[in-house]
Image: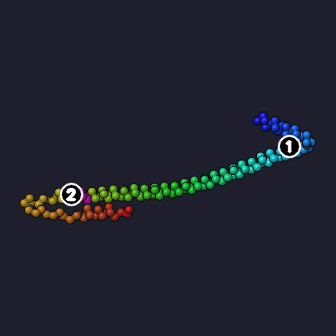
Amino acid sequence: MIAIALTAWSALKALREKLDWRGIALIAAVLIAGLGLHRWASSLKEAGRTEIRQQWAEAQRKADLLQLAKIEAQQKQINAADAALVANMAAHVGQVAGLEAALEDERKKTNAKPSAASGDACPAAGDAMPDGVRNALNAIGATDR
C-alpha cells in the first residue's frame, strides 16, 4: 500500500514538472467526473435491480393468490363430498334400522307360530323372504351413491 502511494506521488511529481497547474486541474476534473459517472451508473443499476425485485414480488404474490384460490376450490369440493357422504351414511342408518325392525317383526311372528309336530321326518323348508324384510333390503340398495 505504501509502495502504491509512493509510486503515485512520484508520478504526480514528474507530471507536475511536465504540466502546469491547468493540466493537473484538468486531470483532477476528469477523475472527479469519472467518479461521479460511476456512482450515477451504480445508482441506475441498483434502481433497475429494485424494479426487477418488485416485479418478481408482484408476480409471486399473484401466483400465491391463484394457488390459494385453487386450494379453496378443492377444499369446497372435499367439504361437499364429505357432506354428501355423511348424509348418505345417515340415510343408511335409518334404512338399516328399518331392516332390523322388519327382521324383529318376522322373528316375533315366527316365534308366535306353533311349532310343527316333532314326528315329521322331513321338516318344512324355510318360508320365502317376508315382504317387510325384502322391502327394507331394497330400500338400502336404492340410495344414490
Q: Is residue 126 left or right of residue 51?
A: left
Colour scheme of this structure image? rainbow
Query: What label sits on residue 136 in the rendered view?
Result: none
Magenta stretch? 101-107
Q: Is residue 45 left or right of residue 128?
A: right
Q: Considering depth in this image, is 136 or 64 the residue closer to the camera?
A: 64
Q: x and y percent of residue 70 in the render? A: 53, 57
Q: Is residue 106 magenta?
A: yes
Disc 1 from disc 2: Cα separation: 116 Å
Q: Name the residue that disc number 1 marks.
A: 28
Q: Is residue 57 magenta?
A: no
Which image quadrant for residue 16? top right
Within 10 Å of disc 2 (Cα), the crowding (few <14, some 14-19, many 20+) is: few
Q: Considering depth in this image, is 119 or 131 the residue closer to the camera?
A: 119
Q: x and y percent of residue 41 in the render? A: 76, 49
Which image quadrant for residue 123? bottom left
Point 64% across, 53% down: residue: 56
Point 15% across, 64% down: residue: 125
Q: x and y percent of residue 128 in the render? A: 20, 65
Quarter that holds the N terminus:
top right
Point 77% across, 46% down: residue: 39
In terms of secondary structure, what is the magenta stretch mainly?
helix
Residue type (three-letter) at the residue carrying disc 2: Arg
Quarter that holds the C terminus:
bottom left
Q: Name the residue that disc number 2 marks.
A: 107
Q: Is residue 126 above or below residue 56?
A: below
Q: Say how many tags the image has.
A: 2
Residue type (three-letter) at the residue carrying disc 1: Ala
Q: x and y percent of residue 117 in the render? A: 9, 60
Q: Nearer the viewer, mark 1 or mark 2?
A: 1
Q: Residue furthest left?
A: 119
